[in-house]
Image: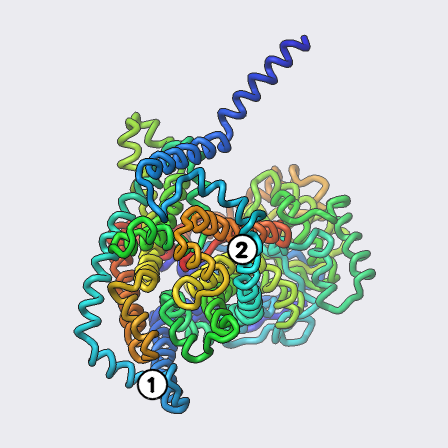
Amino acid sequence: MATTAAATPARVASPRFSGRLDIWPTVAAFVFLIGGWELLGRALQQEFFPPLSKVLTKLVEVQAEIFAALAISLQNLVIAFAFSLVFGIGLGLLMGAFRKVDAALDVYVNALLTAPSLVFAPVFFAIWGLERWSVIAVIVMYCVWIMVVNTVTAVRTVSIELLEMGESFGAPRLKIWTRIVLPSATPLIMAGVRLAMGRAVKGMLNGEMFIAIVGLGKLVQDGSRAFDASLVLAVLVVIIVIAFICVWLVQLIDNRLTRWLPKTSR
Amino acid sequence: MAETTLRIERVSLVRRVLDSSTLYRLIALGVFGGLWQLATLNHKSLLIPTFADTVAAIPDLLFGAQSSALWNAMYQSNIALVIGFAISIVLGIPLGLLIGRFHRIERFASLYLNILLVTPMAAIIPLLVMSLGIRDGAVPARVTLIVLFAIVMLIVNSRAGIRQVDPALIEMARCFGAGELSIWRRILIPSSIPAIMTGVRLGLGRAITGMVVIELLLIAVGLGSLIQRFEARFEGAHLYALIIIVVFEALILIQVVRWIERVVAPWRKMPTFGGGR
Amino acid sequence: MIEIKGLSKAFPGRRGSEPVQALKDVDLEVRDNEFLTVLGPSGCGKTTLLRVIAGLVGHDTGTVLVEGKPVTGPGPERAMVFQSFALMPWDNVLTNVAFGLEMQGVDKKTREMKALELIEMVGLGGFEKRLPGELSGGMQQRVGLARALAVSPKVLLMDEPFGALDEQTRRLLQEELLRIWEATRTTVVFITHSMEEAVLLGDRVVLMRPRPGRIDQILEVPMARPRSTHLDSVESSGEFTALVGLLWNNLRVMHSDVRRTHPATQAEARP
């Protein structure tokens, strides 16, 4: 390490390594955000933009409702995400393994990834009506395709040298998959899962807002109908926290699964 | 002689058809349509049309009796998209470039960008409605939402574009006496164009999402209100056909941007960033 | 041409660790019309030395004079050739070669005429409309060389310019560079990590040693000029072999320095 660091002195000076002061701008930005929200809210005196303190008061006030809604929402999220993991990575591996499957499906998968996912909500509503499956289907629609696409790319970009190495040592096809393809593909697959997590949370809220019978999405719609901006923002704060926690959880798993990656390329 | 060449040609044609992806795509479409048709034939439902009815409804919407309703809705929806996306480009790209060039701003801004990326923007629609109203098709509220959806992608990718500029190029320019202005004009901007265009493409995707989301969730105008009308009248085939048309609009628009990407930056393959929505 | 006295330069260390002393008390004079090669193992500060002369990084102590004037930043009398070529992939060969003149505010017609002349000189006539991505590595570095020569510099600074090229291309470009240099006699400071290259091209070889970066010794190269016409016989001469051998004996000691202090990282840390 010491020798390579000395070998490129110019690069050592790059700001990425300048160390401890790094978190201060973030802290400042956070304080600025909180303070700015509070002050602006007080100054504006507008119904649609209440100060943070009012939103937090509201949050405490309706916590029972929010927790009940949250429980339902998270259930939807977990069911949909679990299904998407199995289906998305499974389909991705199939498409990665068999050229013909890939040829048959790649345009459609890409189209579904590009298309605005919520546009399919009326279809699901037509099929399942007000049941929770409508919401779950919306969440799946939001998050599954990015996993498929990333998994296909992950399988396709496994180093040919490694594959040839496996073959030259006489590894059977199955062994090549379990010992070489899957481990090499894990980082990219996990990157897809991470993106999918963020999308899933959005799908959850949007789906629930569309169906508007259960969960956090319904609370937002309630707040909207009652012109209660505090309620809307309180739910939004909860959603943002949930989203950060979910993505962070995926990141934790990712870090465990891909510990062998050199730190710099992470 | 001629006969053998002909036969070789025919063989290679068969081969080419068998090897081409188009065949498999058509097979996949056929299987999907067939399953749909089978599933719906036996379970007659008002809102779930058969595959054949849905396919037949597409030309009806585009050119038939319903076409004026469709094109009207298209215009209403897309006017907000055009304005919103234009604003996103004009604000987002310069902002992203500045953030990318100056690390101080970057550190400060990254928290906000992360929040913008993670926040489900749909939740703030009620606030937009409360503040901007829904009179005259709610254009200000819709435009604002589309900007909020799209601008992050433009900022984040323009920033990435600046940050991945080869430092050797900047150093080279400084060596030959270039000032900050020349460095921007001759190095930073051209070098960032592929990433900026990627941002434009992803941003467009998100702008379309924003357009659809606000119309479906809260302010039923344009395509959103047309969808609701078909739903209320149980015109399942038209409902499904309309959804397919909206998806196709998105795909066509994004394909156009892809094409522009290739034209303006032919010297290198496009990197991609983000892709969340 | 260039006078360096008591030059020291340190870079801040990573996360509070010790600063890296890239250069310490370097004294060096580069004579007019001299081809000076600088050789040393990784981490000896040779690239930093070049970047200080170029005015791309500042220095802590000492003086650096080019034509009697202290270096405060890049200047038109110095032009650099980069290891990574540093060509703008969106501009064609002509625009790339004319870049230095463009920055000096030379009008389009004049600078393109000058650029064409140099494109011809480095053997790329007919390629002026190509994009760098369509050229081989050797051709790209010819463009880099032409771009540097186009501004008619007093000093040509070359930072391992052939380091990214394969052996055969490298040899062709060495010949080309010597041929051009023998015609123009521009002062050259040439960084390399190849002993053969240093001896083959240079009038003098500056040998540097690492931790901290400093000058070990300066060797005169006795072989006569011009050499470009008979590089092969230069390379098989006894003087050449003796000098390369001498350099390697000195370099080997520097490497075994490293081995004693970092037993785990010796072999694989060396390129």
| Chain containing the residue with disc 1 | A
Give the Cα distance between marks 1 and 2: 42 Å
Cβ atoms at labels 1 and 2 below 8 Å apart? no
Look at 54% across and 57% down and name the residue there. B69
Q: Nearer the viewer, residue A171 or A11?
A: A171
Where's residue B268, x and y in %?
A: 58, 50
| Chain containing the residue with disc 2 | B
Query: How many callouts does the rendering have?
Result: 2
Q: Quadrant of the C terminus of chain A?
A: bottom left
Where's residue B197, x and y in %?
A: 56, 58
Q: Which amino acid type corresponds to the residue marked 2 in the rendered image?
A: Leu
Look at 61% across and 76% down and name the residue there. C72
Look at 36% across and 54% down and name the residue there. A142
Mark 1 vs mark 2, foreground winner is 2
Where's residue A39, x and y in %?
A: 37, 89
- Are the residues flagged by discs 1 and 2 from a single subunit? no
Question: Could you say whether the residue bearing mark 1 is in a helix, strand or loop?
Answer: loop
Question: Could you say whether the residue bearing mark 2 is in a helix, strand or loop?
Answer: helix
Q: Quadrant of residue C10?
A: bottom left
Asked whether, in this view, residue A94 is left or right of residue B136, the answer is left
Local packing at callout 1 (Cα closer than 10 Å; few below 14, some 14-19, many 20+) is: many
Is residue C49 among what the camera can see? no
Image disc number at residue B70: 2
Residue C104 vertical placement versus C41 (above, below): below
Residue C158 vertical placement versus C169 (above, below): below
Q: Which residue in the structure is indicated by mark 1?
A: A51
Q: Nearer the viewer, residue C123 or A74?
A: A74
Is residue B26 among what the camera can see? yes
